[in-house]
């Protein structure tokens, strides 16, 4: 009886284990992509998920009818999400929970009382100061400024300026506004930066142009040009940089990105008021470290950053069109998470177009699926963000335990190794800091820790070092005297 009962119990345990294994497999395959990060050698390794796809929302889900090519999304200070529904020539305002459309802006009232309509609006921005809407109304060749009731305040159109090439069309694609009310617009086919306008709409010039990619061909052309005549130099084809694709504003800084798959210089920039790139002299990489060759499409999948979002906590979210992935970095550009892919399932994209963040969620518009996918922060993501926020706020000691918790959950998480190394360095645990700095491949931190460790050894063993030095000096002196005596006696022998 006992044996039979044991067999039944064993069988039940095996069945339960199989069920749990199946459940784990289903959970692991719920996302249409594998979660990964990069180790200290910049090799991809499996990692814990920072975000998981919660749901995908269509226009019908919002009660607004199907969307058509949504191209931009923005969360306003009024607690509403605004979607540029480009193909339907309208702006949809959805509630904070993304459950219903609160208002649809498909017609606007001009100051003279007439109606005006949007034509392929591709960008939307809501001013926090007055809740006014700034719309990149691309095919109407204008930036439309309206209050939240749909009354037009002004239009910004093609500048009549010597700075602006009049042969160029004026096609705004994206728009943002700074605290002073200055308007910035990304224009189609413009490589000299984003257009700047005063609050009254007066054109002031271009801002934040990208640098030319320094390829070997360009360097060779430059050297050849040094020996050309002025006439030949004038006729030579000029090399131009890639244009800015998208941008976001955070306080006094404007972050820009370019979607050029061949551009590695100025892929992502952080511009100050003077237009200087804070990231210019930093060795940074955005997107996958190594481009992947896709045999099914016979294409090299180089990163193509189509949108950038600066979250409330300062994290930088980059949307890569090529792979359909979201690359999230902290404010120091350390990689935190990689989320998303090209796929039909929820969590994957056909044509990733825009990204926005709010609270602990990410919102990505897909202009082919005509949906907005909502990603929710995981428990692991929450721990990482807590540690990162404390660290970036200067609370290194307080961040130490959260970073250790991150490593308990994912022992290969490089950012946590760096966080622990910096915290231990601040606490004076130089040996521990050296250990974690080495795991993070952080040479600068390791050097500082080693310097501190060396000074600590000297202080702790100062007496021994001085005594040893005295012994060595005394021994050296005795040896020198003996050598001198032998030399003198040898010289005397030779003279005699």
Image (cartoon, rainbow, N blue to C red):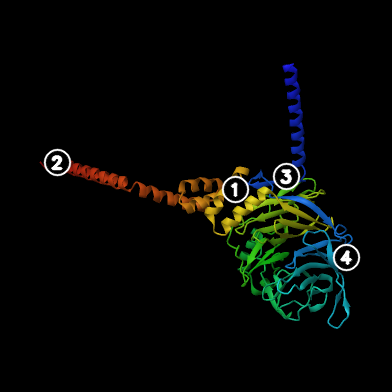
Where residue 476 sits: x, y (%)?
24, 44
Q: Position of residue 281 (x, y in %)?
A: 58, 62
Q: Is mark 4 on a helix, strand or loop?
A: helix
Q: Residue furthest bottom?
A: 112
Q: Taking 184 as reference, is 106 left or right? A: right
Between discs 1 and 3, the one toward the N terminus = 3
Q: Which of marks 2 and 1 is in front?
A: 1
What's the residue at 69%, 51% (across, down)? Answer: 338
Callout 3 secondary element: loop
Q: Is residue 273 visible?
A: yes
Residue 472 in the figure: left or right of residue 365: left
Residue underneath mark 2? 489
State which quarter of the image contains the N terminus: top right
Tag 2–tag 3 contact (CB < 8 Å): no
Tell me the CA gap for discs 3 and 4. 35 Å
Alpha-carbon span between mark 2 and mark 1: 68 Å
Quarter of the image for residue 261 reads bottom right
Inter-mark Cα distance, 1 to 3: 18 Å
Q: Name the residue under label 4.
A: 88
User: Which residue is tagged 1?
Assistant: 414
Left or right: 192 with respect to 452? right
In the picture of the structure, the residue carrying the numbered disc 3 is 34
- Number of other residues with Cα within 10 Å of mark 4, as a class: few under 14, some 14 to 19, many 20 or more: some
Residue at screen point 66% across, 51% down: 382
Is residue 488 or residue 465 the one in the foreground?
465
């Amino acid at each position: 009886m006992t044996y039979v009962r044991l067999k039944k119990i064993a069988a039940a345990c095996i069945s339960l284990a199989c069920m749990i294994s199946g459940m784990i497999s289903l959970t692991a395959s719920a996302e249409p992509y594998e979660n990964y990060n990069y180790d200290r050698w910049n090799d991809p390794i499996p990692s814990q998920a920072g975000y998981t796809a919660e749901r995908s929302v269509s226009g019908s889900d919002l009660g607004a009818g199907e969307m058509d090519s949504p191209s931009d999304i923005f969360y306003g200070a009024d607690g509403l999400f605004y979607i540029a529904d480009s193909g339907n020539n309208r702006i949809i305002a959805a509630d904070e929970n993304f459950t219903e459309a609160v208002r649809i802006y498909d017609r606007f009232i001009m100051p003279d009382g007439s109606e005006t309509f949007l034509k392929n609006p591709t960008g939307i921005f809501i001013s926090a100061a007055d809740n006014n809407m700034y719309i990149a109304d691309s095919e109407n060749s204008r930036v439309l400024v309206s209050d939240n009731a749909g009354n037009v305040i002004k239009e910004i159109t093609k500048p009549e300026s010597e700075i602006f090439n009049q042969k160029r069309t004026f096609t705004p694609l994206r728009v943002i506004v700074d605290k002073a009310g200055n308007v910035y617009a990304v224009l189609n086919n413009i490589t000299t930066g984003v257009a700047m306008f005063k609050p009254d709409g007066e054109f002031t010039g271009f801002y934040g142009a990208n640098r030319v990619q320094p390829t070997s061909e360009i360097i060779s052309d430059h050297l050849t040009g040094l020996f050309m005549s002025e006439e030949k130099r004038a006729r030579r084809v000029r090399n131009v940089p890639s244009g800015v694709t998208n941008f976001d504003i955070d306080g006094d800084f404007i972050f820009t990105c370019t979607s050029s798959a061949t551009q590695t210089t100025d892929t992502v920039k952080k511009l100050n008021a003077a237009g200087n790139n804070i990231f210019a002299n930093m060795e940074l990489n955005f997107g996958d470290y190594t481009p992947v060759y896709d045999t099914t499409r016979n294409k090299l999948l180089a990163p193509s950053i189509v949108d950038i979002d600066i979250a409330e906590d300062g994290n930088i979210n980059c949307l890569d069109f090529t792979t359909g992935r979201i690359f999230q970095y902290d404010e120091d550009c350390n990689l935190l998470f990689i989320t998303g892919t090209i796929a039909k399932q929820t969590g994957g994209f056909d044509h990733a177009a825009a990204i926005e963040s709010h609270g602990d969620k990410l919102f990505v518009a897909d202009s082919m699926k005509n949906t907005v996918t909502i990603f929710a922060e995981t428990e692991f993501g929450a721990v990482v963000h807590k540690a990162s926020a404390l660290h970036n706020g200067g609370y290194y000691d307080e961040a130490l335990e959260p970073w250790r918790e991150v490593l308990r959950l994912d022992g290969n998480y490089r950012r946590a190794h760096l966080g622990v190394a910096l915290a231990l360095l601040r606490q004076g645990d130089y040996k521990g800091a050296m250990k974690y700095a080495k795991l993070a491949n952080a040479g600068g931190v390791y050097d500082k820790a080693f310097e501190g460790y060396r000074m600590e050894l000297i202080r702790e063993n100062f007496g021994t070092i001085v005594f040893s030095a005295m012994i060595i000096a005394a021994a050296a002196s005795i040896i020198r005297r003996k050598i001198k005596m032998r030399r003198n006696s040898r010289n005397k022998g030779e003279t005699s």
